[in-house]
Image (cartoon, rainbow, N blue to C red):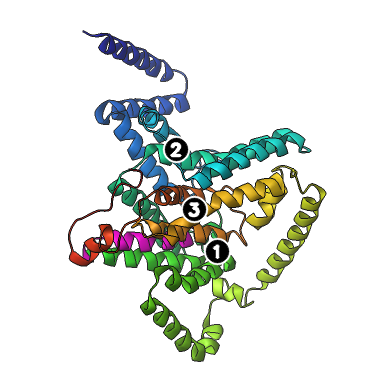
Amino acid sequence: MDTKSILLNIVGAVAALALVALTFVNTIAMLFAVVLAIGLLLVVALGPERLGAFLVLIGVFLTPINAFRPLVSPSFAWSDILLVLGFGLLLPRLLRNRARVPSLFAAGALGVVVMSVASSLVAANAGKSAYLSGFFLAAVVILPLLFSLYSPEHRQLVTLASAFVAGQVLSALVALGEGADASGRYDGLTYHSNYLGVGGVIALTLCPFLHGVATTRLWRTVILGAGALSGASVYLSGSRGCLLAIIAIAIVYPLFERSAVSAYLLFGITIGLVPLLGLIAASVAEGSALGRLLGKDPTASGSNDIRRDKLSDGWHRFLDSPIAGSGFEGNLSYHNIFLQVPIAIGVLGFAAWLVMLCAFISPLFGNSPYRRFGYVALAYLAIGLTEPLLFDRVAWVPMSFVLLAALAPSRGPTEGAESAEVSGSSATPAHPLR
């Protein structure tokens, strides 16, 4: 028996004894022991890397589903735990690979890290600011780097994007089944209706990529249905900012697609809706996104006043420390990422953050078959004008896919997924990181 087998037997024996001991402590410890035993069996059956990839996939699926949490605090969701466990099991693979990131991301991330540390040191509550800066850096720097090191192949990347959309579709279906709350808004499997809207916009912007790489008519139809449900979830959520984000993306979509057909279609739909505006305004539900945007919901004006006061307070806070920033404490109350960032890390950090974001937008200007991932970055920026998405997992898990797209090689219009869609073949684009 070799040394490796002996060590595995020792670890297995120790783990078994620990599990037996836990069963005699209390019920919670016994349940923990059962879960741990199942986990060990899965590691043995699937292997660490395969199980790690599976946990990352489930973590992505649960990202738009944040109503179920292991703790009372909204700081951690099950998706966070599964992603941590998954990447932990993938550690050998991560260490074997070399992180490749766009130079814009690398330069911007360095500035963001430096200014996050500096602003926390000078913040009024340095401990709280440092704690929150950890979440910020984990979302905008560490998570994209982990996915870069993971380096998923084309099929894995498509599966990850599909998993996020599937999670949002499930949340939307639950929302339709449960019905609206007292305010007329739907929240599905999220802890706040706004997150149903945010997830809907992000999922909808993933659908153009998924539709482009689908090789059968059935899958393209399924993706169109998923996109329709994702768009419907935005309407049901009552989030005006998310609805405006979809409208903004729809306007620029023909430009990035370089498609006259899309432009004419958008123009035709707009012209067709003009005579119906009065009927639509009269029949729209109060708690829906459109109803709240049109002022039919009495709670909308109160929300406007609160946000306006918070933005004014945030602007004055920024002016008090414009260079170094004032840290992250209380930052989530300002519903605008373009104010949240300079408040937290100052104008220098804000400039670095903008440089970093350029890497996420860049795919839209290329010819890579992965370029449509760039719509996710557009969605993040558009929603961020009215939502505090500074480091929210619902945005930054899919944003990590965008960073992979930024590394994909440019290809001609007859290559990769585009040609596969036309010819019906099973051709797939080149690996995004190779």
Q: Residue at x 76, y 38 (%)?
A: 123
Q: Amino acid at mark 2?
A: Leu
Q: Main secondary structure of the magenta part?
A: helix
Q: Amino acid at mark 1?
A: Asp
Say which mark, if any, is on residue 360.
Answer: 3
* Residue 62 in sight here: yes
Of tags 2 and 3, the one toward the viewer is: 3
In the image, is residue 11 above or below residue 405?
Answer: above
Q: CA distance from mark 2 to mark 3?
A: 16 Å
Q: CA distance from mark 2 to mark 1?
A: 38 Å
Element assignment for label 2:
helix
Q: With 152 as the anchor, is 66 left or right in this view?
A: right
Residue wearing tag 2: 146
Q: Where residue 112 appears, x then y in whole percent? A: 62, 42
Residue 370 picture quarter: bottom left
Q: Where residue 92 appears, x then y in whole percent? A: 36, 27
Q: Residue at x 41, y 34 (%)?
A: 87
Residue wearing tag 1: 181
Q: Residue at x 62, y 47 (%)?
A: 352
Between 11 and 261, the one lying in front of the other is 261
Q: CA distance from mark 3 to mark 1?
A: 36 Å
Between 30 and 84, the one lying in front of the other is 84
Residue 228 picture quarter: bottom left
Element assignment for label 3:
helix
Chain part drawn in magenta: 198-217
